[in-house]
Image (cartoon, rainbow, N blue to C red):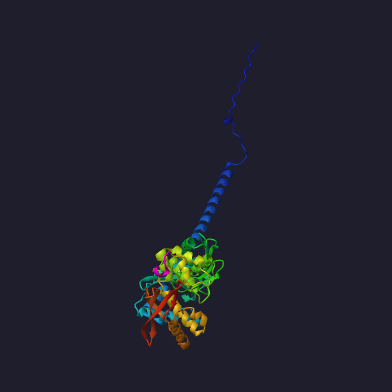
Amino acid sequence: MSRIRFEWNIESEQVDEFDGEDPQLKLRRRRNVIRLVLLIALLLAAIGMGGIGIRQRLIDVRNQFAQLLQDTVKAEVAALRIGDMSTWLKLQSAASDEWRNSQIALFQHYEALKSEGAIELTGSIVAVNIDGERARVLVQENIKGSPYVRLWFYQRNEDGWLHAPPDFSFWGEERQFAGAGLRVNYREADEQFAGQLGDVLADWRLRGCKLLNCSALPIIQVDIAPSAPEAVAWADEQNLHLRLRSPYVDIARADLPFDGAYRFQVSKLLAKRFVEEHSGLQTATYPHDAFFLLKNAVNWLSEWLVSVGPSPSLMQSLAENYGAQKVAQLLSVLDSTDDMSRIQQVIPGAIELAELDWRDFISWRLQTEAELIAARAENAWLSLYDTSDESIRIAAYQRFNQNAPSRLRRVVDQLIWTTEEGLPQLRITAEFKSDDATAVEIVLFNLVNQVWKRAS
């Protein structure tokens, strides 16, 4: 029997399939694809380089405009420094006669400050903002040793940059400061002012409502706007909505734009609102002592919030001797027709021994007396006197019937003693103007039912 042997030795890598395409054509196609990719890459690179070039050109142009703007500002400051009004006016836009006249007045203002040695025109540029053909520049100057800034606006034409009137539409984007119990709406140019204002108001609300019962008041809302008609005013007093004019419309402290003048105006409004909320009194009835006490409390609270050296006053002496809470206690029991005897209700000892400063109160009393005489309000006027002594009554009516023009008195000193009859008496020294000289007058007051009544 013959043997048949079958052997298969087939390996896949040994089989070379043939796709029927010419290898040379295939190679050329690959080269064309590569060339196309490279061409696209080069085109994109060229476009990118062109974009970079255009961008750089725009940057160069903007930098050139910015440099020209800074040169214009420096030229203006130099004209102010040397007193060259002609150059100063050439750099002003021809917006209107009103604008030109205002710049003449500003130039003369600088001349006056220079003559007093009160200003240093540094020409330092704090900030620059350019938007197309308009720009705003914050320029620093030192007045009496303190840094101030002015916000100047410019318009660009074929002749370059010219100083233009304030552009309220170019005050920057709208922003908001939110703090504890308050919200401040402002625009970019007022960033520093709004930040300081917000921090201070948050502190005032916290301290004021800790002393007085005013925590139920709504949040404090503030709108800062360059076009506000008044520096500080209520937009809605009941809802604690304030409207402030940007300090950069005129001039502002570089380091403290929310400066003393702004602080006192704002604190006065808030103090009045805090006191009204705590006491429940919107007003007190003139000429009752409560009218003075309420107003005096507002003034004291305003200074207390600002944390400045307090002015001598009745409320300040009450707070200093017995604590600020005594002012709050007095306000909580005060009625619109009360007299000063209400103070006795909140202090522990006799009112004549309380070491209270009566000077501003007596100054008000003397002025009120003169007003009541002029108004011929006999009953209200007579209530200011100790009529238990007939001689005091007769002297008082002589003054009333004489009806002499009132003169402003300023009480400069006080002394409390006890009369021979054992009654407390207040001796005050008042100054007034007489024939261009300062004269002195002594006036006595007796304590009648815890109320100082005139006795001379």
Task: Examine the rendered structure and indicate whether residue 40 appears above or below residue 90.
Answer: above
Residue 118, position as x, y percentages in the image: 36, 76
Quarter of the picture containing the N terminus is: top right
Residue 349 part of the magenta-drawn span: yes
Q: Is residue 268 magenta?
A: no
Q: Is residue 67 above or below residue 25?
A: below
Give the side of residue 79 with respect to residue 46, left or right. Answer: left
Res. 82 in view: yes
**Residue at 51% of width from left, 57% of height from top?**
48
Residues 243 and 210: in front is 210
The quadrant the C terminus occupies is: bottom left
Magenta stretch: give its range.
348-354
Q: Position of residue 46 (x, y in %)?
A: 51, 57
Q: In x, y percent, where is residue 20? A: 63, 39
Determine if residue 258 is in view: no
Depth check: 342 or 161 in front? 342
Q: Closest to the observer: 453 or 264?
A: 453
